[in-house]
Image (cartoon, rainbow, N blue to C red):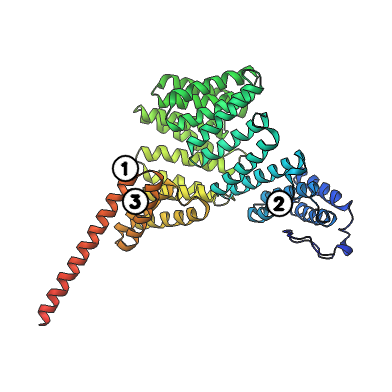
């Protein structure tokens, strides 16, 4: 039997008659075996083989008709690929799963298509391709609204999810708009101070804090905390206390910030233990607070406390959580102008992230930060190498028109100038200029910085040509 049209399955058996894949009972049986293996955490490679065979069986038995069981099987198979870190293999299966459902066939088909778009968006997010990820989420969101209506609580959940994606992509205005939609939907459909509203307000607080509206952030976070306490969600309250402390810190209300952090510290020690990375994150916040208030000894002490946790992590802690902690402590040491220690910590974080799939964008950010510090130390070759590695990753995994990308290009151009690679510097400055003009406007400080660097580089090129002309003229006179 021939494979179905448009099949994107691999590693299956070509001859269905020999393997029995044409039996309609085989697909459900194989898929159940695969899911049982996944649930048990045993032999994911075997689970993948079973899921692939199940998908081929479903495909053969569907006779070209839309089959939601095949869609579900493709979702499971893609999830197994992702658990193995093989995200690129998952993408064509999810694209196939989106093509199968027919919205006009009813709600089940529409929601299956929605689920495919969202899972595809998650997969792109793990690859660091945020633009593709948001596109998938947005398409799925429109499908969900069409079938459920714009005020359904499930639409509110997707609003918040999409807002988080926009926040990760540094698109804060759109994140705030979507989060407000989620808040409005949940207030309309839920009781006052519901858990859904608490989650919306918590995210809105983080968005407002990032945008610099600290008073609004504090208001949302306090309301979120009250709702969580009312719903007996004490385990989540400590994290909100940390965010409340951040808002107080931004407002220079240091005593209140210390009080909020200490409450979080006490709660985390009770619920998670003395050596959990959550404790380390509070230590980092306290280190930052004491640095800002000029108490460097206390700041250094809290940094050391955090490092004792991050350098000997508890079993079962995700490695990226430790790497994030190391980068946070590095930022404090950088503020203290201890650049050597800051770089050492970033190198440790980089080593961890290099072993974690789907972290190219994060690794690029760390490499760019290392490039800045190497430049400040006068080590221009290492600075150039760090920026070069970061930019090559950003070209692949991130929106090449982002402001961060433009800033990284500008910084790499400065390293080129110091290494007398003037032509390359001009090319980098020109690309950075084009991006930052589009993203930030011509009068933004980052754009003006590129203008200045570009003007200075062209001036240097002019001086170089003038020196060359004078040298050639003198040589011609000597010959004459």
- Residue 234 pos. (x, y %): 62, 22
The first of marks 3 and 2 along the sequence is 2
Report the quarter where the N terminus lies: bottom right
The first of marks 3 and 1 along the sequence is 3
Checking the image for residue 375, the label placed there is 3
Left or right: where 191 falls relative to 321: right
Q: Is residue 327 visible?
A: yes
Circles 1, 2 touching at the beta carbon (< 8 Å): no
Report the quarter where the C terminus lies: bottom left
Left or right: where 312 falls relative to 3: left
Identity of the residue drawn at 49% across and 55% down: 393
Front tag of 3 and 2: 2
Disc 1/disc 2 C-alpha distance (Å)? 45 Å
Disc 3/disc 1 C-alpha distance (Å)? 26 Å
Disc 3/disc 2 C-alpha distance (Å)? 50 Å
Q: Nearer the viewer, residue 92 or 269?
A: 92
Checking the image for residue 110, the label placed there is none
The first of marks 1 and 2 along the sequence is 2
Identity of the residue drawn at 30% across and 47% down: 449
What residue is shown with label 1? Answer: 443
What residue is shown with label 2? Answer: 99
- Residue 367 pos. (x, y %): 45, 50
Please, is residue 195 above or below residue 303 in the view?
above
Front tag of 3 and 1: 1
């Amino acid at each position: 039997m021939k494979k179905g049209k448009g099949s994107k399955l691999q590693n299956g058996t070509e001859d269905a008659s020999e393997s029995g894949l044409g039996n309609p009972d085989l697909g459900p049986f194989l898929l159940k075996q695969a899911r049982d293996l996944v649930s048990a955490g045993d032999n994911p490679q075997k689970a993948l083989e079973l899921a692939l065979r199940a998908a081929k069986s479903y495909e053969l038995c569907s006779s070209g008709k839309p089959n939601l069981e095949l869609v579900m099987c493709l979702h499971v198979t893609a999830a197994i690929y992702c658990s193995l870190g093989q995200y690129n293999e998952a993408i064509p299966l999810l694209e196939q799963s989106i093509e199968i459902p027919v919205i006009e066939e009813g709600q089940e088909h529409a929601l299956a298509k929605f689920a495919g778009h969202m899972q595809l968006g998650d997969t792109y997010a793990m690859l660091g391709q945020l633009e593709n990820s948001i596109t998938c989420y947005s398409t799925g969101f429109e499908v969900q609204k069409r079938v459920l209506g714009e005020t359904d609580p499930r639409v509110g959940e997707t609003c918040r999810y999409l807002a988080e994606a926009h926040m990760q992509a540094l698109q804060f205005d759109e994140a705030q708009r979507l989060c407000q939609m989620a808040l409005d939907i949940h207030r309309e459909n839920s009781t006052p101070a519901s858990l859904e509203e608490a989650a919306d307000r918590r995210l809105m607080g983080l968005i407002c804090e990032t945008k610099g509206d600290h008073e609004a952030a504090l208001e949302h976070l306090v309301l979120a905390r009250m709702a969580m306490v009312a719903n007996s969600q004490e385990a989540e309250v400590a994290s909100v206390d940390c965010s409340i402390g951040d808002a107080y810190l931004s407002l220079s209300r240091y005593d209140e910030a210390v009080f909020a952090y200490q409450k979080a510290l006490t709660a985390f020690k009770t619920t998670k233990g003395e050596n959990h990375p959550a404790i380390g994150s509070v230590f980092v916040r306290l280190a930052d607070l004491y640095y800002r208030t000029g108490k460097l000894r206390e700041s250094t002490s809290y940094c050391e406390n955090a490092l004792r946790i991050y350098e000997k992590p508890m079993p079962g802690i995700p490695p990226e959580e430790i790497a994030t902690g190391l980068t946070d402590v590095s930022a404090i040491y950088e503020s203290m102008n201890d650049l050597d220690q800051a770089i050492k910590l970033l190198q440790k974080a980089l080593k961890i992230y290099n072993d974690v799939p789907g972290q190219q964008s994060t690794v690029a950010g760390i490499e760019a930060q290392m490039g800045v510090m190497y430049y400040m130390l006068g080590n221009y070759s290492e600075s150039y190498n760090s920026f070069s590695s970061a930019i090559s990753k950003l070209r692949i995994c991130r929106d090449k028109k982002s402001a961060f990308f433009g800033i990284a290009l500008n910084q790499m151009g400065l390293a080129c100038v110091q290494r007398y690679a003037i032509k390359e510097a001009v090319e980098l400055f020109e690309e950075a200029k084009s991006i930052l003009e589009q993203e930030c406007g011509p009068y933004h400080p980052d754009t003006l910085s590129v203008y200045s660097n570009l003007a200075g580089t062209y001036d240097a090129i002019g001086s170089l040509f003038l020196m060359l002309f004078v040298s050639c003229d003198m040589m011609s006179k000597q010959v004459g």
